[in-house]
Each structure stands twice: as C-alpha cells, then as structure tokens.
C-alpha cells in the first residue's frame, strides 16, 4: 500500500469535501478548497526560495487562518514545521532555533520586528507566501520529518521533539477511530497552536475526516457558552483547568444539546472534579493521556465504556505497558510502575540528540515516559504520579530548574528552590523558597520580574517564601518533598 503524507491525505480526504466549511475564526472562514489552495501557495513560495526536503521551518504568527495554512504549507513543501510560542522573547526563540538547526523562519507582519531580531538565515513573509504560485510535494515517506515541537523538560534545557508524517498519521487515525469523528462533526478549538494537542488532535484529526473547526481567539470562561451557541460544536477538547473554570458559569438551557462529548487531558483530573464537570456540562467527559514524545495521545476512554479515574486503554496501533521504573520489565496488573509506550507514534527523537537522564527516552522501541501509573486487567490505565520533577500548571509543563536559574540571576539570592503548590483552579502553581545573601534584602517584585524577563509569565512564582536555609536530605540534596509539604500547608 502506497503511503500518503499529511498534506497528501489532506488533499484527498479534505478535497473530497472541497465545498464544505473547513475552518473559521470569529472574523473569517475557509472552505476545504480555500484551505488547500492557501496551503499549496505557501508550499510554492518555500519551494521557489529553495526549500529542500527535510529543511526545518519555524512559524511565527498570530493565531488564525494564515497560521494554520503555514503549518500544512511547510509540510506540503517537504519541510518540517516548527510552530513558535510568539510571547517568548526573541533571544530565547533565536537560541531554540539555533540549537535545533532551524534555518528558515516564516513570519507574519505583526511579528516582523521580532523575526528580524531572531535573525534566521532565511526569513519569508507569511502574507507574501499566501500570494505565491501553488506548489506541492508527493512521495513523502512515513519517516520523513513533519513537525518539530519545543518543550521544556525537567532539566529546563530547551529541546525539540521531532515527529514524522508516520507519527502524525498514526496518532490521527487512532484518535479519530476512538472518538468516531465524521464529516458531520464540528470541533470548538480553544487551545494553543504551538502545542501538540492544538495541532495534532484539533487540526489534523478533524481535517483528515472532513470535519469543521471553529478556531476561537482564546478560551474565555465567561464567553464559552455563547461560543457554543454560535458555533454549535459536536465535541470539545481541553484541559482540566479549562473545564473547572466553567463551573462558575451558568449554561443556558439546551446550549449543550448538540455536543456528543468533551475530551480532557494534559494534566491530572480528580474523580470528584471529573464528576462535577460532567454534571455541569451535561455531556460525557472523556479522559485521555499522552505526551509530545508519543506525538500526542496514547490512551483514551471509549465513548461508550468510560471508567472515571482512568485515562482508558491504548489507542489502535499503540502498545502501552506499565513497567518497573527505568526498565522494560512489566509489573503485575494493578501495580504501580512507569508508563511505557511503543508503536508508530513514538518520536523520531530529540533535536539535538541528548542523554534523557530521568526524562522520557526511547529504548528498544519503547518510550519510557517518566510518568507513574497502574493498569487494570482490562487494559485501562490510571496515572498515579510522575518521576520527573515538573510542575503542571493548567496543562502546561513548567521547569523548576529554569525558574530557579532565573531567580538565581539576582545577586541578592544565595539559594532557591521551586516546587509546585496545589491550586484548585490550575492544579499546580509554582512557588519559590529563597535564601538571601548575607547583608542583602529580597525584593519580591524584582524576583518576579527576573523570572518574567527570562521565561513566560506562567512561570512566575505565585508565592515567594523567604527562608534562612533550604532543607536537605541525607545525601545533601535539597529536600523538595519537604518543601512541597510546606507549600501544601500554605495552599
């Protein structure tokens, strides 16, 4: 059977619905024919400038239709697209692109100044590309590079995850089968376009099935039910924080009548919160699990057989096992161990290649995720914790090490440690324990500014505890378990 790449599948399956609406924002919309045309024009622009198969192209643009065309246009040209988080400083973006060998930058007009500051070897205007002659690539293979996503692991060192066309298609087929997506479906999209979920599950999946995507400007709890009434979605997808924020909003009678289900992933979801959300929305809440290193989603509850407290069994084509941490030795059913994933969704690798340490890593075809879980006799997985020391704030992974480095850049800081504090809304938020140098005074505003200047705003500690000394364990390392206890008591 001949392999069809993501752009080829989009052209054939999406093209079968050429006149149907494909995607719309609050101010504009494209049919499938218009989406395919925009994609082909960006591919043509890149090819005319000399893009070669496998070249890496960063995408820096406003959330909207041109951004979506840019994603698939780079793939159609034979390149690997690298969507950027536009709110990050230019210097940080430049470092990421240099470390990952990204030589091309496709940027829109609102980000032209930042694009110049980044200083990529080749920069192309997104608006000009949309006016170019059409082009396309055929003959791409499953192992050809398609998507590069930056993430911040437990070490805080920026790294990129490289995914192939085979990875993306395997994930899309598994998700589409489990959620039974058809051309009659309508998805309400409110998640970031630089994260794997916002791309793979909320663009690739519906487009390959000929469904419609309503691309909101942002998620707003106050406007959510009005958005549902306007766009009439048949399904939703989000993170626990998004759904928990809806509990304070009243849903007009009948507004959710057309919604088949709501998907939830990216962060822990308690059984009680799960039930509260289901009662409030009046639709099934389907919990799932995955990570960027396995493309996006690896397990999901079936729509007709959900088990609250679990993230469901493996999707078609994937293997999920619970093993003794650090090994591929399976544990007994019901026992806790490290979650491991195998199959065509496992990433091609990190860029640059690195020693994964205690983070996710691939061994003998299995991805060791660093997450802890247990699996029952029927194959339903429950996530019980994590080996890696990250803070999951509203579905976003924050690196304690990166925040500590930002705080330590202040000369008045002698030592510091960052841990997660429980938060009813976001799940976890970062808090910092800081020791002042002798004779120095700590200024909370200056410390927070130091973090925000180097990282994104979500990394700024919500609490700063001034302490005389950091607790240590028996081998002289900072005892973060003890700090977490202290933070939880203050939550």
Image: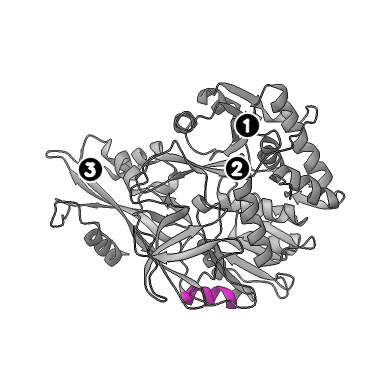
Q: Which of the two discs, 2 and 3, labels the residue nearer the N terminus? A: 2
Q: Nearer the viewer, residue 467 or 205?
A: 205
The question of residue 181 being in magenta is answered with no
Q: Is residue 438 left or right of residue 64?
A: left
**Callout 1: SS:** helix
Q: Which residue is mark 1?
A: 110
In the image, which residues are magenta? 271-279
- In the rendered view, tell whether residue 392 sits above or below residue 146: below
- Indicate which label's residue lies in the foreground, 1 or 2: 2
| Pick the front one: 101 or 361 | 361
Q: Residues within 10 Å of mark 3 (few under 14, many from 20)?
A: some
**Gap between marks 1 and 2 measured at Cα:** 34 Å
Asked whether residue 223 is in view, the answer is: yes
Residue corresponding to mark 3: 442
Q: Is residue 437 left or right of residue 183?
A: left
Q: Position of residue 367 (x, y in %)?
A: 45, 54
Residue 442, image x, y percentages: 22, 43
Q: Is residue 98 above or below residue 8?
A: above
**Nearer to the camera, 6 or 289:** 6
- Does dot 2 land on a helix, a strand or a loop? loop
**Residue 215 percent location from the top left of the image:** 69, 51
Q: Quadrant of the C terminus?
A: bottom left
The structure residue drawn at horizontal position 40% and vertical position 67%, both measured from the top left corner, is 330
Q: CA distance from mark 3 to mark 1?
A: 38 Å
């Amino acid at each position: 059977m001949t392999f069809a790449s993501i752009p080829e599948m989009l052209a054939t399956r999406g093209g079968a619905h050429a006149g149907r609406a494909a995607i719309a924002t609050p101010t504009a919309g494209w049919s499938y024919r218009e989406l395919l045309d925009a994609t082909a024009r960006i591919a043509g622009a890149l090819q005319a400038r000399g893009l070669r198969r496998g070249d890496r192209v960063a995408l820096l643009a406003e959330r909207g239709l041109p951004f979506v065309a840019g994603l698939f246009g780079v793939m159609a040209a034979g390149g690997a697209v690298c969507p950027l988080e536009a709110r990050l400083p230019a210097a940080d973006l430049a470092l990421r692109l240099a470390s990952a060998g990204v030589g091309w930058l496709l940027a829109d007009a609102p980000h032209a100044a930042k694009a110049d500051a980044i200083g990529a070897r080749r920069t192309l205007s997104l608006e000009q590309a949309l006016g170019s002659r059409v082009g396309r690539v055929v003959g791409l293979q499953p192992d050809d590079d398609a998507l590069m996503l930056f993430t911040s692991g437990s070490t805080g060192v920026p790294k990129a995850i490289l995914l192939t066309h085979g990875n993306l298609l395997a994930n899309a087929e598994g998700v589409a089968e489990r959620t039974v997506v058809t051309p009659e479906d309508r998805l309400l999209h409110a998640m970031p376009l630089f994260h794997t979920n916002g791309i793979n599950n909320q663009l690739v999946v519906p487009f390959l099935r000929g469904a419609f995507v309503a691309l909101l400007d942002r998620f707003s709890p106050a406007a959510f039910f009005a958005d549902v009434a306007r766009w009439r979605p048949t399904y939703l997808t989000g993170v626990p924080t998004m759904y928990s924020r809806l509990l304070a909003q009243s849903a007009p009678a009948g507004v959710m009548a057309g919604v088949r289900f709501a998907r939830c992933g990216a962060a822990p979801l308690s059984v009680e919160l799960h039930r509260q959300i289901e009662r409030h929305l009046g639709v099934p809440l389907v919990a799932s699990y995955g990570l960027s290193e396995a493309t996006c989603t690896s397990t999901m509850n079936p729509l007709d057989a959900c088990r609250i407290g679990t993230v469901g069994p493996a999707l078609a084509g994937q293997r999920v096992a619970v093993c003794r941490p650090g090994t591929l030795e399976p544990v007994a059913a019901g026992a806790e161990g490290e979650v491991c994933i195998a199959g065509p969704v496992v990433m091609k690798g990190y860029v640059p290649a690195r020693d994964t340490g205690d983070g996710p890593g691939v061994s003998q075809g299995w991805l060791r995720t660093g997450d802890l879980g247990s699996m029952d006799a029927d194959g339903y997985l429950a996530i019980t914790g994590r080996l890696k020391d990250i803070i999951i704030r509203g579905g976003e992974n924050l690196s304690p090490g990166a925040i500590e480095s930002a705080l330590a850049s202040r000369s008045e800081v002698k030592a510091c440690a960052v841990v997660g504090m429980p938060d009813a809304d976001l799940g976890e938020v970062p808090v910092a324990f800081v020791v002042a140098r002798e004779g120095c005074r700590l200024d909370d505003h200056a410390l927070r500014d130091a973090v925000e200047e180097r990282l994104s705003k979500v990394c700024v500690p919500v609490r700063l505890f001034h302490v005389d000394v950091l607790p240590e364990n028996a081998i002289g390392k900072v005892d973060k378990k003890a700090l977490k206890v202290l933070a939880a008591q203050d939550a």
